[in-house]
């Protein structure tokens, strides 16, 4: 079933919208959640919550790209679950990936208070569009899907040190790009 048809099912409040969503994007959403939570049961719970949030948000929202819409919801719910679960104990998988990226986009000032969010998103998208397809894929696997270095290495058939080097260089390029654009001091 096409995405537009699935979205129309939500608009018509037909329960099979969730079935069709799961059929087409269940593995995708589960993969996102599992990469963050590292627990099958918690990932399944977040995916179910993703469907509930989607049901409650369509309408009034009408996503342009359903896959991205679902992925964003699954990712945000999973990160929130991760933070609740790890509030007291330290699990560095997620923290390390986000800290690496934070070095590129933060300064002494609070980025959220200084920048228009949409402008920053556009700047990041523009930066990503300038990377080669392979480097962009590796960058997104690490910082959007939150795959470990080992997983990225395996998926891309490159050594872990090669992946680390690509990511380090990409972060440096991002930092320079943001400095040139006046986003970073």
Image (cartoon, rainbow, N blue to C red):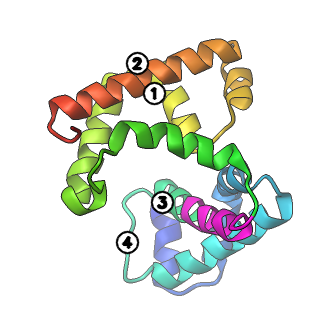
Q: Residue at x 60, y 19 (%)?
A: 163
Q: Is residue 83 magenta?
A: yes
Q: Does the rendering let one see residue 108?
A: yes
Spatial separation of the CA atoms under disc 4 and disc 2: 31 Å
Residue 99: percent from the left, percent from the top? 52, 43
Please say if the residues under marks 2 and 1 sit with CB atoms less than 8 Å apart.
yes
Indicate the quadrant where residue 22 lies: bottom right
Q: Look at the image and give the residue range highlighted in magenta.
A: 75-88
Disc on the earlier residue, 4 or 2: 4
Distance (Cα) linking label 4 and label 1: 28 Å
The tag earlier along the polypeptide, 4 or 1, is 4
Residue annotated with mark 1: 136
Identify the mark nearer the N-term, 3 or 2. Answer: 3
Q: CA distance from mark 2 to mark 1?
A: 6 Å
* Image spot of residue 86 (x, y percent): 72, 63
Q: Position of residue 79 (x, y in %)?
A: 60, 61
Residue at the disc numbered 4: 62
Disc 4 secondary structure class: loop
At 21% from the left and 32% from the top, the residue drawn is 179
Checking the image for residue 66, the label placed there is 3
Side of 61 relative to 31 (left or right)? left
Q: For the residues marked 3 and 2, what is the alpha-carbon distance in whole angstroms?
A: 25 Å
Q: Which residue is mark 2?
A: 132
Compared with 137, 117 (above or below) is below
The answer to whether the residue labelled 3 contacts the one labelled 2, judged by CB atoms less than 8 Å apart, is: no
Label 1 secondary element: helix
């Amino acid at each position: 079933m096409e995405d537009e048809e699935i979205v129309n099912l939500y608009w018509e409040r037909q329960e099979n919208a969730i079935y069709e969503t799961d059929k087409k994007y269940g593995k995708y959403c589960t993969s996102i959640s599992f990469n963050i939570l590292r627990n099958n049961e918690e990932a399944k719970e977040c995916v179910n919550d993703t469907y509930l949030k989607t049901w409650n948000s369509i309408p009034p929202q009408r996503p342009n790209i359903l896959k991205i819409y679902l992925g964003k919801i699954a990712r945000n719910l999973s990160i929130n679950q991760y933070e609740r679960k790890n509030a007291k104990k330290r699990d560095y998988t997620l923290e390390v990936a986000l800290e690496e990226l934070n070095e590129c986009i933060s300064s002494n000032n609070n980025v959220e208070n200084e920048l228009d969010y949409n402008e920053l998103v556009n700047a990041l998208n523009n930066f990503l569009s300038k990377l080669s397809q392979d480097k962009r894929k590796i960058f997104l696997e690490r910082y959007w899907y939150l795959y470990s270095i080992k997983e990225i290495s395996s998926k891309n058939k490159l050594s872990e040190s090669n992946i680390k080097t690509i990511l380090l260089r990409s972060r440096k390029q991002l930092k320079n790009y943001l400095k040139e654009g006046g986003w970073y001091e």
